Image (tube, rainbow, N blue to C red):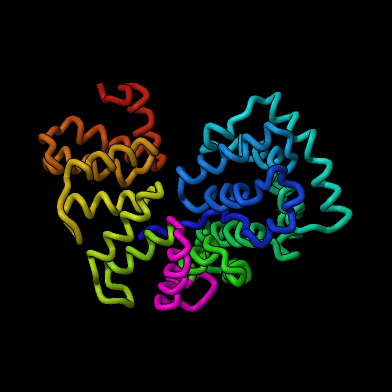
Amino acid sequence: MRVAFRLAAFSAAVLAGSAAWAAGGGTDAIVRLLNSRSSGSPQRYAAAAAIVAEEAAGGAPLQQFLIAVISRDRDAPRAAKLTEEVRSRYLENSKGRIAALAKEKNNALAWYLLALEANDRDMLERAASLGNVQALNALGTMKLMQVIDRGTGSAEDEAAMKEGFECFSRAAESGDANALNSLGLCRQNGYGCEKDEARAFECFKKAAAMKHPEATNNLGRFYREGIVVEKDLAEAARCFEKSASMGELWGQLNYATALMFGEGLPKNERRAVELLESIAKRGNAEAMDFLSKCYSQGLGGLEPDPGKAAVWMVRARAARGDANAVKWLKVNGESGK
């Protein structure tokens, strides 16, 4: 079972107070940009980034700051990729106004924006203390991931888990879909709270109703495995298809699996293989393992090919950080030749 926490995005309510900064009525696009940046939908992220980038080019300071900040993300959409010259100019035009708003008005959104640009935890905690939804989600993620990575089970770690859970709980009170999804993962796994799969299901259901890609996939897992609800492969497949259509990587993987084996929908092995290849190109090790199995056993209409099966297996190991696998690929090339 996959457990993941993303740095979730602003809610519309938080951004509403910043409409004056958004030239041309672009606040809605900014909300979409920040929400999709963390919810697992590359298509929505790219579409919103294109609108905000256009407004930034027209001189809108908030849009300029946001585009400048996300331009260095490894997975930033093409529209958000900036030259260093443009990025510097955007920050020079906008950062002073945002810093003044933070320091003179103690504005939570401004503190979060500065924290995001400077990667400053003190600013992040200040924004969270003022109730900024994005900051609460980011802080909750940081606290939980640090503990999950350490895995010591100490009293200090337990306290950090509870603090992370409380951050998501506060953010979820505003109806933020990213927070609801993270809260669901906490309740499902007992992170900082008592394990409660029924309440986790409700969190995922609420977030999925808001078309949250990851929550929709998580909801599908509950139906597929019969967790607190009657097992329903058809409903699971519908959830996976919805999540996949929004570009969510794990939703696509689960949908590909359903297509491959006809779980809740008619088999379509060719489409399953196409999805697996697409997901594997995005660096997903599980999809690589699946492709290795397909070539090994001749699944999905593929001819058995031990050589290709071995290469995909090595790629999967490299994607997980296996140094020997990485070295082998460097020596032999991605094709394994």
The reply, left or right, for residue 261 in relation to residue 189 is left
Against 281, residue 102 (above or below) is below
Asked whether 15 falls inside the magenta stretch, the response is: no
Q: Nearer the viewer, residue 154 or 23?
A: 23
- Who's the residue at 22% across and 45% down the image? 272
Against 312, residue 44 (above or below) is below
Q: Residue furthest front?
A: 24
Observer able to see residue 160:
no
The answer to which quarter of the image holds residue 167 is bottom right
Against 68, residue 134 (above or below) is below
Magenta-colored span: 187-213
Against 51, residue 185 (above or below) is below
Placement of the N terminus among the 4 image quadrants? bottom left
Q: Nearer the viewer, residue 148 or 176?
A: 176
- Who's the residue at 64% across and 25% down the image? 83
- Give the total number of marks visible in the rendering: 0
Asked whether 190 falls inside the magenta stretch, the response is: yes
